[in-house]
Image (cartoon, helix red, strand yellow):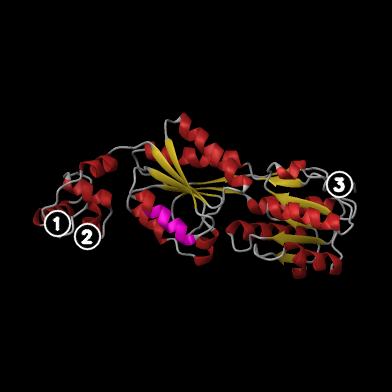
Amino acid sequence: MKERITLKHIAKIFDVSIATVSKSLNDSHEISTETKKKIQAYAKEQNYKPNSIALSLLNKKTKTIGIIIPNILNSFFAKAFVGMEKVASENGFNIISCITNESYEKEVNIMELLKNGTLDGFIISLSEGTQVKQDFSHLTNAINEGLPIVMFDRVTDQVECDKVIVDDMEGAYNATSHLIRTGCKNIALLSELYNLSVGKLRLEGYKKALRDHNIEIDESLIINVNKNDDFDATLIPFIKDKNIDAILSLDENSAIKAEKTVLNKGYNIPEDMSIIGFTNGKLPRFVTPSISTISQHGRVVGAEAAQMLINRLNDDEDREYKTKVINTSLIQRESTKETVSN
């Protein structure tokens, strides 16, 4: 059986976007005469029959956006999703949400699946697998096919699109500086995010704060924990061998596990050891002692990402891509001491 000729097939033949093929077949003034003639001639030769549903999806808004997040158990992404849903609903948009579980392969498959559906655009935070692999072709392909994308939190400079990011460097800088002002001098950094862009930015913020306060950077105080490792087996020898008086944890779960480990080893918090963690979810508030956190304002990030995508979908004119930066806040609780007065 002869394969059916589609807009996607013609776009591939001429190395153009599907939107360009559609406009050429509709004799749009936006496309050059030469390109239109070539595409129209090929379509006629191949007996191309337009798919009315596909054409309607190309030429009309479906009022549906796809949201792709790496981990729904992370409180930041849960809050961001709430912000996106609220803005989408207020603007009359429906959403389709998918979770990659940090897998590059799942991210690619989800993109392919949703691209062929009834979507106007995407909001995405990159999976760990994608950031490790550094292959973003599935994203650039979607953009080239006329589907706008807004990245949030975990982003890459290798894809040109609108972005909403958290000032992770600022957050880690402020957290480390706060610990120093409370009298801490040997501050360990605990990270399960060392493969991620956000983890690298937080590490830089930590180091910058140490330099600015004339504290020598000790690389041995930086603990990268694999998610499959035994957390206690990694942290307990470290606490025993290193004379640390504070831990900056780059994610919420590590902060909670670190507090439990420290307490089980007989340390008092914050008298013997202070702890600050990233993301201001519910758990840090309700453990004892409650944990000081860096709030990334997830709802604000999600709302900004959704509004940015909707603005682009509603804007008929091309405009430059923008990056919106959301500042962090330090939420002080029982796991940190009061600042030392000079």
- Verify whether residue 111 appears in magenta: yes
Q: Residue furthest front?
A: 1
Please, what secondary structure does the residue beneath circle 1 have? helix
Q: Rounded to the nearest whole Å, what is the CA distance between mark 3 and mark 2?
A: 65 Å
The residue identified by callout 3 is: 339
252, above or below 313, in the image: below
What residue is drawn where x is 73% and y is 51%? 277
The region drawn magenta spans: 104-112
Image quarter where the N terminus lies is bottom left
Image mark for residue 38: 1
Read off the residue under disc 2.
Answer: 14
Helix, strand or loop for the magenta stretch, by majority = helix
Q: Are marks 2 and 1 in contact (CB under 8 Å)?
A: yes
99 within the magenta span: no
Q: Quadrant of residue 194?
A: bottom right
Q: Nearer the viewer, residue 336 or 180?
A: 336
**Label 3 packing within 10 angstroms: few (<14), some (14-19), many (20+):** few
Amino acid type indicated by mark 2: Phe
Of callouts 2 and 1, the N-terminal one: 2
Residue at disc 2, secondary structure: helix
Nearer-the-camera pick, 74 or 138: 74
Q: Is residue 140 left or right of residue 230?
A: left
Residue 202 point in image, percent of width and height: 66, 57
Q: Is residue 92 left or right of residue 45?
A: right
Label 2: how many Cα within 10 Å (few below 14, some 14–19, many 20+)? some
Labelled pair 1, 3 in contact (Cβ < 8 Å): no
